[in-house]
Image (cartoon, rainbow, N blue to C red):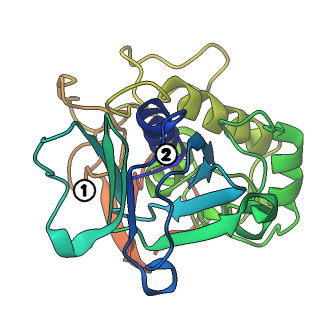
Amino acid sequence: MPEGDTVLQTAARLHAALAGRVLTHADLRVPRFATSDLSGRTVLDVTARGKHLLTRIEGGLTLHSHLRMDGAWRVYAPGERWRGGPGHQIRAVLTNADHTAVGYRLPVLELLRTNEESKAVGHLGPDLLGPDWDPALAVDRLLAAPNRPIGEALLDQRNLAGIGNVYKCELCFLARVTPWLPVGALPDGVLPRLVALAHRLLDANRDRPTRTTIRAERRPRTGAPAPAPPQRPLPPLRVQETLYVYGRVRRPCLRCGTPIRKVDEADRPTYWCPACQSGPMP
């Protein structure tokens, strides 16, 4: 699922394939921009901003895209078979002499003037993986709505940019609170630590092919509360275990052994441990 770390990796791949090269072919398969001709223009850079991608092009243009739940950009060599999905899912094709970048299932694709990028990303809060990262500002924005559930607040990109549903679930687990606990009900000191942890996790995964939030050892960090005693013997940590709760419904919690629960909310699944995490539950 594309989140801030995935989008940053996508931007790096696109930048390496496109930046400094002249477009020999460009095809934007959305009605509003289908007649736009970018051929002959040089791509200047590709930058991630939160979960948004900004491809800046010679002549003061920016191609803005957002991956949402299942969008993807793939890069192919000349003659290589495109494997990102059926042709009807392709929304953008950018080709130069060395590479072709193909955008699949992009729910947001628009061509902007570069000096008007703020129309697309100006609403975003501090970027967890960007040069503007400001943890104090992120905390202030989260506290501005104390009655809002923490999971919902973390997903709001106006508070801090880069967290998606996977990190929402994992962060709440690591903070030992349910995603439905109001921001203002968090114990003292938890919110700043949660924001710092969000930055640390995304930064640790910015170059990893597989996202992980699990420490190899199962002992708490110095100063962290001791884990609850297991209700049943914990299974050995399997190689493929990369996340504490996300995608692990009915499997034993890696901290206490209780089966992980799941609920679907607004097309987003939420996973949590009912024993380790305190607060309201569905």
**N-terminal-most mark, 1 or 2:** 2
Classed neighbour count for the residue bearing mark 2: other residues with Cα under 10 Å, few (<14), some (14–19), many (≥20): many
Identify the residue at image location x=33%, y=29%.
209
Among the 4 quarters of the image, the one containing residue 130: top right
Q: Is residue 123 visible?
A: no
Q: Eyeballing the image, is 33 above or below 278?
A: below
Q: Secondary structure at mark 1?
A: loop
- Decide if residue 248 is on the left or right side of residue 106: left
Label 2 residue SS: helix
Q: Which mark is residue 249?
A: 1
Drawn side of residue 264 relative to residue 140, left or right: left
Residue 134 in percent (x, y) is at 84, 38
Q: How many marks?
A: 2
Side (left or right) of 39 relative to 176: left
* Residue 263 in sight from this viewpoint: yes
What is the three-letter code of the residue carrying label 1?
A: Val
Front tag of 1 and 2: 2
Q: Which mark is residue 7?
A: 2
Q: Label 2 sits on what residue type?
A: Val
Percent x, y for residue 66? 51, 62
Residue at coordinates 65% horizontally, 34% vertically from top-left? Answer: 199
